[in-house]
């Protein structure tokens, strides 16, 4: 039994939106990581991760998201999350993730917040 | 509500944790637990399962699950989920709480499972010996 994760990206200059669908486990996390690595190598420095269609994540997937965040911070980039389920939102806040990445209700809010970063 | 109990044994294989969450969801809905509470139980259960898979003791090890809907002495209903493996066990007191700041400075990014379980459930008991680990998690209605 498995529920694979699909990833879609939309790029707008140095900002990109990455939309996920499905379970973010090890495979899902690695798919997101590959996608974001390609964006970073292509000059993107601000990324919105929209989890609207992801209803469940696990700590292995989350550990890969931490690696992605670390890589973006090293490059002076910025990452923001949006459209989290209440449980994923709560979990990210328990981790203290909101200190290092934006957590927003909508994709528009997340894009605006990242666009405001010089 | 009548006492309900379901037992399940799953192989320690990636993805099988979702079979466990389907059972938790069905019982949570039957006892009319709120959607957020059901999702919190599912999240914690995924963590308990993948922890058990990693410590199940043998490549083809199995993990035993028990779901129980019952009433507390005060009358409130609760969903109790028990996850048991036959691995070598661990000392929960020696598990260091994860710190995101440290994890963002390199090194191992894992180690969040127990923190998530303890934060999302109302009560958690961990019994671990050299012959296995049992985690009992309770969520009150």
Image (cartoon, rainbow, N blue to C red):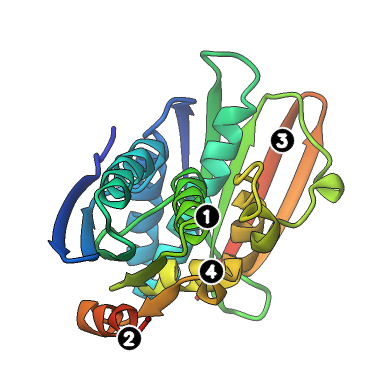
Query: In terms of secondary structure, where does tag 1 sit?
Result: helix
In this image, B105 relative to A76: left or right? right
* Chain of the residue displaying label 4: A
> Residue A116: which numbered mark, if any?
2
**Marker count (numbered):** 4
Of circles 1 and 4, the one toward us is: 1
The residue shown at (67%, 46%) is B135
Say yes or no: labels 1 and 4 on the same chain.
yes
Cα separation, mark 1 vs mark 2, equals: 21 Å
The answer to whether residue B31 of the structure is visible from this angle is yes
Q: Residues within 10 Å of mark 4 (few under 14, many from 20)?
A: some
Which residue does the numbered mark 4 point to in the structure image?
A: A97
- Of mark 1 and mark 4, the one earlier in the sequence is 1
The residue shown at (51%, 13%) is B60
In this image, B49 relative to A38: left or right? right
Image marks 3 and 1: residues in contact by CB distance under 8 Å? no
Cα separation, mark 4 vs mark 3, equals: 30 Å
Percent coordinates x, y for residue A112 in the rendering:
26, 85
- Of mark 1 and mark 2, the one earlier in the sequence is 1
The residue shown at (53%, 73%) is A93
* Chain of the residue displaying label 1: A
Cα separation, mark 3 vs mark 1, equals: 33 Å
Q: Residues within 10 Å of mark 2 (few under 14, many from 20)?
A: few
Image marks 4 and 3: residues in contact by CB distance under 8 Å? no
Which residue does the numbered mark 3 point to in the structure image?
A: B133
């Amino acid at each position: 039994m498995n529920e694979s994760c699909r990833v879609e990206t939309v790029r707008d200059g140095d900002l990109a939106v990455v939309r996920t669908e499905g379970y973010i486990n090890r495979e899902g996390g690695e798919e997101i990581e590959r996608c974001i690595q390609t964006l970073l190598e292509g000059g993107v420095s601000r990324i919105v991760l929209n989890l609207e269609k992801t209803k469940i994540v696990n700590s292995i997937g989350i550990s890969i998201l931490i690696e992605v965040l670390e890589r973006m911070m090293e490059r002076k980039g910025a990452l923001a999350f949006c459209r989290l389920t209440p449980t994923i939102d709560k979990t990210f806040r328990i981790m203290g993730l909101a200190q290092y990445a934006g957590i927003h209700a909508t994709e528009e809010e997340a894009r605006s917040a990242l666009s405001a970063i010089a | 509500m009548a006492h309900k109990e379901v037992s399940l044994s799953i192989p320690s294989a990636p993805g099988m944790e979702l079979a466990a969450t389907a059972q938790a969801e069905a019982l949570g809905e039957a006892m009319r637990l709120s959607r957020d509470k059901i999702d919190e139980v599912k999240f914690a259960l995924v963590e308990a399962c993948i922890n058990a898979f990693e410590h199940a003791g043998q490549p083809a090890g199995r993990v035993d699950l028990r779901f129980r809907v019952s009433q507390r002495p005060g009358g409130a209903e609760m969903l109790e989920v028990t996850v048991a493996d036959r691995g070598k066990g661990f000392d929960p007191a020696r598990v260091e709480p994860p710190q995101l700041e440290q994890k963002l400075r390199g090194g191992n990014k894992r180690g969040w499972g127990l923190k998530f379980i303890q934060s999302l459930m109302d009560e958690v008991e961990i019994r671990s010996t050299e012959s296995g680990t049992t985690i009992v998690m309770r969520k009150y209605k």
